Image (cartoon, grey):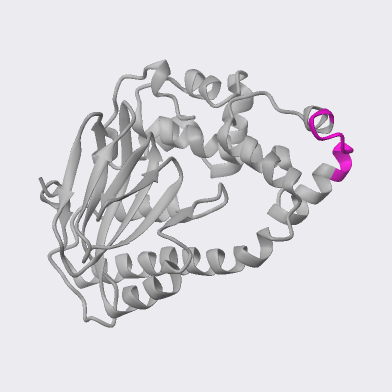
Amino acid sequence: MDIRQNLFHSAVHLDKEFISLLAGGLVRTPSPSFYDVLESSCYMLLYTHSGNGSLASMGKTISLSENTLLFWDCEKPFKLNASSPIWGFHILFLEGNTVSSYYKYFQSHGPLYHIAPSSDIPSYLQRLDSLAVIDTTSKALTASKWLTDILTEICVVTMSSDTHEAHIPAYIMEMKQLLDNSYEMNFSLTDFEKRFGISKYRLCREFSHHYQQPPIQYLNARRIDAAKDLLLTTDMPVHEVGSAVGIDNTNHFISLFKKNTGTTPFAFKQGAPASIRSLHFSYKPDCRPQ
């Protein structure tokens, strides 16, 4: 089955010099399940916000994990497979001469972009989903603007990171990896000082220099991003969401959430588009983001 059959479709296509959103939507699919996508002259963006999946094409498989964005040329037919109990992702099909230009810049770095906690891409994807139906030129141009912002970020950041990461100490990169992948754990600078045998003040200074945020602030931003996903996609109460991302004190969680997003967890959840709220599923511990 071609997944595009189940997505919203744009009724307005812009001139080829613009980026046109052809179809898209938020998908939550259980394992095992798969979608075949037939060859077509467009491009795809696929952002995994929870769980894991994969893309198989021409004998190769690409793993799609949480907080990765796939940029794919759909002239190559492919199959999407869910590989976790629930795989949640935003998927967009787009066309336009500008998309082809961005793709040429990006493809030399590989098909995947790893989204940082400070990235605006998840926010742009939610805005695109909130359009629901693109039935006016105004909506089509708005979608084109947001898609341009997404593609600009992935190309600029990827190109600059090649030089940047070559100069980051291995222990700082390992520190970031731990914060990204195990954010629910209780990390402290003292823990990292013992782990690496390096002063916590130096670790904090170097981490801030390379990633523009102190490590604990970076960790909290990562936790809030994970909390937003749980609020949008599960029926968990606020205090359980806080605990699931490593913040057991509910008042502290609400305070951090508001500091990072400008709103409370409850208001954020209630303000989500109806199309997203309708996809809530019952929370199970083994479905918690890792």
Q: Is residue 269 magenta?
A: no
The extreme front residue here reads 59
Q: Is residue 195 magenta?
A: yes
Location of residue 147 in the rendering, given as x and y in whole percent from the top left corner: 36, 65
| Residue occupying image coordinates x 79% and y 30% | 195
Location of residue 8 in the rendering, given as x and y in whole percent from the top left corner: 16, 52
Quadrant for residue 234, please give it: top left
| Residue occupying image coordinates x 31% and y 47% | 90
Query: 138 or 92, which lies in front?
Result: 92
Query: 63 or 137, which lies in front?
Result: 63
Query: 219 or 143, which lies in front?
Result: 219
* Camera sees residue 45: yes
Location of residue 46 in the rendering, given as x and y in whole percent from the top left corner: 33, 52
Q: Quadrant of the N terminus?
A: top left
Location of residue 118 in the rendering, given as x and y in whole percent from the top left corner: 57, 51
| Residue occupying image coordinates x 33% and y 39% | 53
Quadrant for residue 149, please give it: bottom left
Quadrant for residue 198, please give it: top right
The secondary structure that most of the magenta stretch takes on is: helix
Query: 256 or 171, which lies in front?
Result: 171
In the rendered structure, the answer to whether residue 42 lies left or right of residue 143 reads left
Report the magenta residues as a range. Answer: 194-202
